[in-house]
Image: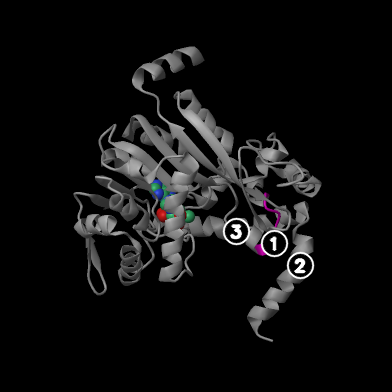
Amino acid sequence: MGIRSAIKKLRRLLEPILRIPMMSVLTSRLAGIGLLVSNWLAKIKRDRKTPYVCSFPHFDPEQSLSYLNEVYEDYFTYSGLASSAVEGKHVLEVGPGENLGVGLRFAADGATRVVSADRFRSLRPPEEQVEVYRRLISSLNAAQRTRLELVLDLRERDYTINSHICTYITESPLEFLYHHLAPSTFDLIVSRAVLEHIFDIDRALETMDLLLKPGGVMIHEVDLRDHGMFTRYGLNPFTFLTFGKKSWYMMSSHTGSPNRVPMRHYFGELDRRGYDIDILKVHAVREDGEEVKVHKKELEYGVDYDDNSVKMVESIRPWLNRDVAHLPAEELLVGAFFLVCRKPDSIVRETAKQMKR
Ligand SMILES: C[S@@+](CC[C@H](N)C(=O)[O-])C[C@H]1O[C@@H](n2cnc3c(N)ncnc32)[C@H](O)[C@@H]1O
């Protein structure tokens, strides 16, 4: 038996013990030492990489293409916008990750300016990205292809993009994008699995509010789960919420790990600014770690979660940090959500602000 399969077997044997909340908490404190060290190293090395830059690092070009198509199409499915609505518009994609395919699809549908901005660099080498773009182009219709040909110049192992239409800003966190971009530039700001990685979320929301035109729309998918940090080892899915704010910051501020900001915080910050907000729950956390896809305004008891899910939350609640310990189980069980919001025009905004005062 190889070492790997022995470790796997041991892990499987230990799983029921590790899932006991107290054991999860104790084990996570040991893992926390490793996280502290890696965060500190990332900080002093001013790391340009994050393990979270590729959602699916094992994907081949065909899988990357179908993932980027899913990401792109979800923006329209969940916002109710038609893809023709992007024609002539200015779009910002925050945190594109491994490739610029989503931004390119906006350009192919007629967006006149697309900015893709990421804090880290893609870990996917250009020669592999080229393969994804080649497949993307051949999947498009003639009009889309003609538009993309103006943007993308593909070579054997590399590519260039026409920066008048598509701009890739890298190594620049969303929180500071106002250094690169003028206020009220964008009609649409989108992101997928990004906002949960941003530690200064208030500054990030402030920046997007600044960059969005009045009447502009934002569509974000936010993943509230632990991204496998502890669940990968069989620990309780809420273990990452047991660390205090300061220790979590010290363990993860420079590695792009999840920020643990609860859903209601996003809602509150945007509501305060007078946004018209729609939230759709898209995943529910389950006791067995299985992914449950939901896509509903509210999780349904008996369908998306049950007494076992509630027990799983209640059993670890005494250890949860005080920012989340008071949240109802049905809120903690939301694994990811889609946020669609429209910025008010300035008159509505002033009135909304006054009414909230
Ligand atoms: C999990 S990946 C998601 C990538 C891509 N959107 C997808 O769906 O595959 C998170 C992305 O957010 C980026 N990111 C993390 N913190 C950021 C920040 N402060 N500003 C902009 N991008 C950030 C990461 O570099 C990474 O590309």
Distance in Å between CA atoms under marks 2 and 1:
8 Å
Category of crowding for the residue at label 3, using alpha-carbon neighbours closer than 10 angstroms: few (below 14), some (14–19), many (at least 20): few
Task: Name the one closer to the observer, 37 or 345.
Answer: 345
Q: Is residue 53 visible?
A: no
Mark 3 or 2, nearer chain start: 2
Pinpoint residue 59: horizontal percent, then vertical percent: 47, 69
Distance in Å between CA atoms under marks 3 and 2:
17 Å
Mark 1 Cβ and ligand 1 under 8 Å apart? no
Category of crowding for the residue at label 1, using alpha-carbon neighbours closer than 10 angstroms: few (below 14), some (14–19), many (at least 20): many
Quadrant of the frame with the N terminus: bottom right
Pinpoint residue 224: horizontal percent, then vertical percent: 58, 46
Mark 2 or 1, nearer chain start: 2
Q: Residue at x 40, y 57 (%)?
A: 97
Q: Where on the picture, by quarter, is residue 125?
A: bottom left
Pointer 2 with pointer 1, Cβ within 8 A: yes
Q: Residue at x 37, y 45 (%)?
A: 83
SS class of the residue under badge 2?
helix
**What residue is shown with label 3?**
228
Please give left or right for residue 136 compared with residue 314 in the image: left
Q: Residue at x 28, y 40 (%)?
A: 89
- 237 within the magenta span: yes
**What residue is shown with label 1?**
234
Please give left or right for residue 221 compared with residue 203 in the image: right
User: Could you tell me the amino acid type at mark 1?
Assistant: Gly
User: Could you tell me the amino acid type at mark 3?
Assistant: Gly
Q: Which residues are magenta?
A: 233-238
Category of crowding for the residue at label 2, using alpha-carbon neighbours closer than 10 angstroms: few (below 14), some (14–19), many (at least 20): some
Checking the image for residue 28, the label placed there is none
**What residue is shown with label 2?**
14
Residue closest to the far front: 142
